[in-house]
Image (cartoon, grey):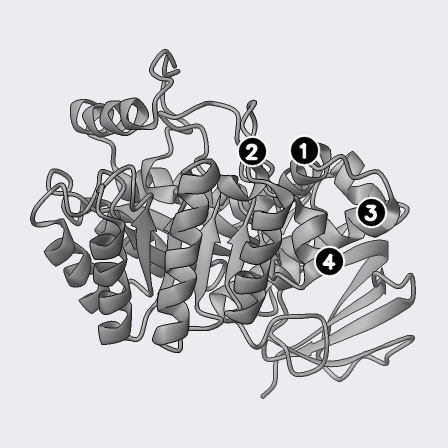
Amino acid sequence: MTNELLIQRVRQRDGQQVDLRIIDGVFTEIGPSLAAGDGATVIDGGNSLCFPGFVDAHAHMDKSLIGLPWHRHDVGPALLDKITHERELRREEGIDAHAQSSKLARLAIAAGTTHIRTFVDIDTEWKLAGFEGVQQTRADFRDALSIQIVAFPQSGMLMRPGTVELMEDALKQGAEVVGGLDPSTIDRDPAKHLDVIFGLAEQYDADIDIHLHEPGDLGAFSVELIAERTKALGYQGRVVISHALCLGGIDDAYLSRLIELLVENDIIIMSHGPSGLRAAPSVKRLRDAGVRMCSGNDGIRDAWGPLNMPDMLLRAFLVAYRNNFRRDDELDMVLDIITQGGAEVIGDAAYGIRPGCSADFVLVDGENHVEAIIERPARKLVVKGGRIVARDGECLV
């Protein structure tokens, strides 16, 4: 017996009103005025806007402080100050990665997120506790939220002997992605750092996602090294450089050279519209050149800061604001980044609102899809694999 769900009267991004027929969790037919099959569950979409499920392609679910007593933020400004403080806080407060990532998962689902790529800290103090906690959350929410795990050496890798072995353990136990971090300024040995993470990725057939905060020419040098290894190992399309702040802080000629390397090696850039005075990559310049991009909410209410929230429409607003996007076509480009762009990064070939794809989608009220970035209405309905997982801004899982 098949399980049919028919969603009537929703609007696609082209403005066309359609019905969505879903059988056993998969879109089977999309078009106007579809007839319900025998025993089908029918829901009137009320002319709502329909989005594919939002993709948070850069999160840190293991160490969010959301739902805990207020944490006073007075550490910094150096990156290592924040990293050290976070490690100490995690130890002193006994942060429970499963509990915290579960809270975050429910909020993300309520906001229409159906896929998350999350980094989990792995170091010689916390060992695999963060990974194991998020892994349990992934199992708990498997029917409501797809979670992909990155084994991430937040406190450094070469500088903390034993970290590489712990990362390898995480990969053996189900982490899908190898993380890296500022190879020149954290581990101070960029060639060795990249040798290790690319070696692990090759051994375990894993993708790579590297945090790169390094500024200017130093960060640009790291981009060159990453591109060199990507090409040598045939890893095109499997490497993300997250943040890549250096791309906003070098001269135009050097930027053009790096963009050529990114396109040639199909290296994806994650940019989340970072706050502060530091330069950031030009989303339009990169996209116009053919660089694939994704975005994410980064750390949510954690030891680094209290401002981020698990809402990808809000993230789209922030990316647009940081890049001075005002035109509808520019805002529409950001919608592509938080949907299809992220889905490509996590490797979900069954993503999208078309027959044969998994029925992961979000309904919101509004005049058009671009306006939704500005108004950010409550998510009227969130469906994952044909199952209703949130309604009117409330997670049902």
User: Gap in Å between the C-alphas at discs 3 and 2?
Assistant: 21 Å
Which residue occupies 29% across, 46% down?
A: 183
Q: Secondary structure at mark 3?
A: helix
Residue receiving disc 3: 370
Tell me whether the residue at label 4 lies in contact with that at label 3, contact meaning CB atoms closer than 8 angstroms: no
Residue receiving disc 2: 274
Q: Secondary structure at mark 1?
A: helix
Amino acid at pointer 2: Pro
User: Gap in Å between the C-alphas at discs 1 and 2?
Assistant: 7 Å
Q: Residues within 10 Å of mark 4 (few under 14, many from 20)?
A: few
Nearest to the eye among marks 3 and 1: give it: 1
Q: Residues within 10 Å of mark 1 (few under 14, many from 20)?
A: some
Nearest to the eye among marks 4 and 2: give it: 4
Tell me whether the residue at label 1 lies in contact with that at label 4, contact meaning CB atoms closer than 8 angstroms: no
Q: Position of residue 193 (x, y in %)?
A: 23, 53
Tell me whether the residue at label 1 lies in contact with that at label 2, contact meaning CB atoms closer than 8 angstroms: yes
Query: Which residue appears farthest toward the bottom when viewing the image?
Result: 1
| Marked residue nearer the N-terminal end (4 or 3) | 4
Residue 322: assigned label: 1
Which of the two residues, 327 or 120, is positioned nearer the viewer here? 327
Tell me whether the residue at label 4 lies in contact with that at label 2, contact meaning CB atoms closer than 8 angstroms: no
Pick the quarter of the image with the N terminus. bottom right
| Marked residue nearer the N-terminal end (3 or 1) | 1
Q: Position of residue 101 (x, y in %)?
A: 37, 43
| Marked residue nearer the N-terminal end (3 or 2) | 2
Amino acid at pointer 3: Val
| Marked residue nearer the N-terminal end (1 or 4) | 4
